[in-house]
Amino acid sequence: MASENETEVNLVFATPIQVSEIADADALNATLLSEIHEVRKVTPNGLPNSWTCEVYTTITNNCRLHEREGFAELTRHIKTESNKFADLLAIQQDPTPLTIFDCWVNVYGRGHSQESHIHSNNFLSGVYYVAAPSGASPIVFHSPDSDVMLSPNFSQMNEYNNGAVGFEPKAGTMVMFRSHVKHSVKTSQIDGERISIAFNLRF
């Protein structure tokens, strides 16, 4: 009688996504909403030509929100959480620490979405949710092989075969990831505004 084969399964090349619940987020978000209101009054939509929907964004306006006094508390949280993530990844920050390179606001309304993309030439990226009404669209992270491999029919999705994983937005939550990880935002089906602040860090 043949002996049973021994089999070991290893998960390699992990793709960590850090999710942080920010303390005292209600007060922080009230301040941020006021600041964003002022930004929107004087800053035209900086929508890049490559984006396919009418999201309001300041991504090309060089607003450098992280350098504004009204965003100082958020900037402090970004630095704290990015240091946690860098420690997890064993990224050396001595003598040169990671710094926030850019920071911008995105406002999604009904019918708005964002196609799959990466944040080129950065190390860490993230998003902080200032407002996320019930039913707001999730951010979806995509497997790096989703564009290059044929996908068979699966009887069920699990951690070994899933090509995309969504994270529901929640006001006061910060999501951080490696900048090369593809991500998108599903089409909004609600009237309320999903307001987020995105950022990149590099050396």
Image (tube, rainbow, N blue to C red):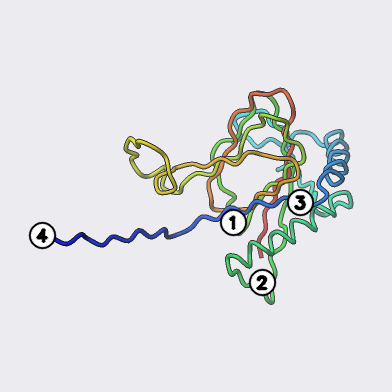
Image depth: mark 4 or mark 1 in front = 4
* Residue at image location 10% in from the left, 59% down from the top: 1
Q: Amino acid at mark 2?
A: Gln
With 78 as the anchor, is 155 left or right in this view? left
Residue bearing the label numbered 1: 121
Label 4's element? loop
CB under 8 Å between discs 1 and 2 = no
Spatial CA distance of label 3 from label 4 is 59 Å
Residue bearing the label numbered 3: 22
Q: Amino acid at mark 4?
A: Met
Q: Residues within 10 Å of mark 4 (few under 14, many from 20)?
A: few
* Farthest-out residue, bottom: 95
* Residue at image location 33% in from the left, 40% down from the top: 150
Residue bearing the label numbered 4: 1
Image depth: mark 3 or mark 4 in front = 4
* Residue at image location 71% in from the left, 59% down from the top: 81
In this view of the protein, which residue sits in the foreground, 182 or 140? Answer: 140
Q: Residues within 10 Å of mark 1 (few under 14, many from 20)?
A: few
In this view of the protein, which residue sits in the foreground, 172 or 37? Answer: 172
Spatial CA distance of label 3 from label 1 is 27 Å
Reading the chain from its start, which is encountered first: label 1 or label 2? Answer: 2
CB under 8 Å between discs 4 and 2 = no
* Residue at image location 40% in from the left, 49% down from the top: 160
Image location of residue 32, percent across then percent down: 84, 43
Quadrant where the C terminus sits is bottom right
Label 1's element? loop
Image depth: mark 1 or mark 2 in front = 2
Reading the chain from its start, which is encountered first: label 3 or label 1? Answer: 3
Q: Amino acid at mark 3?
A: Ile
Spatial CA distance of label 3 from label 2 is 23 Å
Residue bearing the label numbered 2: 93
- The mark total stands at 4
